[in-house]
Amino acid sequence: TTNTATTEPPRTIELDSDHEFRFEVEFNKKVTIKLLKGTAEVFGTELAIGVTYTFTGRKAAVYTWHGCSLEISFLLL
């Protein structure tokens, strides 16, 4: 079988304190989010620095109280 998934190059997003990054991803796509520095949370659950989180088929937001840097990648399945 051939792998037909395509990935956009990752991009870095800087969030100031008390801001959020909202995203909506369809069921046939995935988004990965990695916290590079600072603190951030999704629905009240804190993200760990350097860990890649994968989301599919949802609407969500990454919120930061003190500012953060995120690496975002989108994958079309």
Image (cartoon, rainbow, N blue to C red):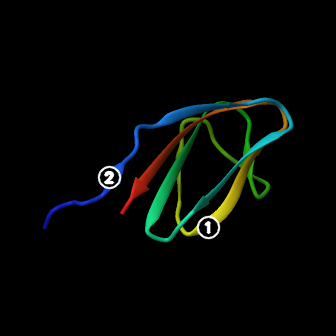
Q: Which numbered circle lies on residue 3?
A: none
Instruction: Say which residue appears at 86% left-offset and 37% top-offset.
Output: 18
Placement of 28 over or under 10, stated as above or below: below
Across and down, in percent, residue 76 comes to 39, 58
Cβ atoms at labels 2 and 1 below 8 Å apart: no
Across and down, in percent, residue 30 comes to 47, 59
- Locate the C terminus by quadrant: bottom left
- Between 38 and 5, the residue placed more toward the observer is 5
Instruction: Say which residue appears at 21% left-offset and 60% top-offset.
Output: 3
Across and down, in percent, residue 60 comes to 69, 59
Disc 1 residue type? Answer: Arg
Disc 2 residue type? Answer: Thr
Across and down, in percent, residue 17 comes to 83, 31
- Locate the N terminus by quadrant: bottom left
SS of the residue under disc 2:
strand
Q: Mark 1 points at which residue?
A: 58
- Between 51 and 26, the residue placed more toward the observer is 26
SS of the residue under disc 1:
strand
Query: Does residue 52 appear to the left or right of 20 in the view shown?
Result: left
Q: Which numbered circle lies on residue 6?
A: 2
Placement of 23 over or under 49, stated as above or below: below
Q: Residues within 10 Å of mark 1 (few under 14, many from 20)?
A: few
Query: Does residue 39 appear to the left or right of 18 in the view shown?
Result: left
Query: Does residue 11 appear to the left or right of 43 in the view shown?
Result: left
Instruction: Say which residue appears at 74% left-offset and 36% top-offset.
Output: 39
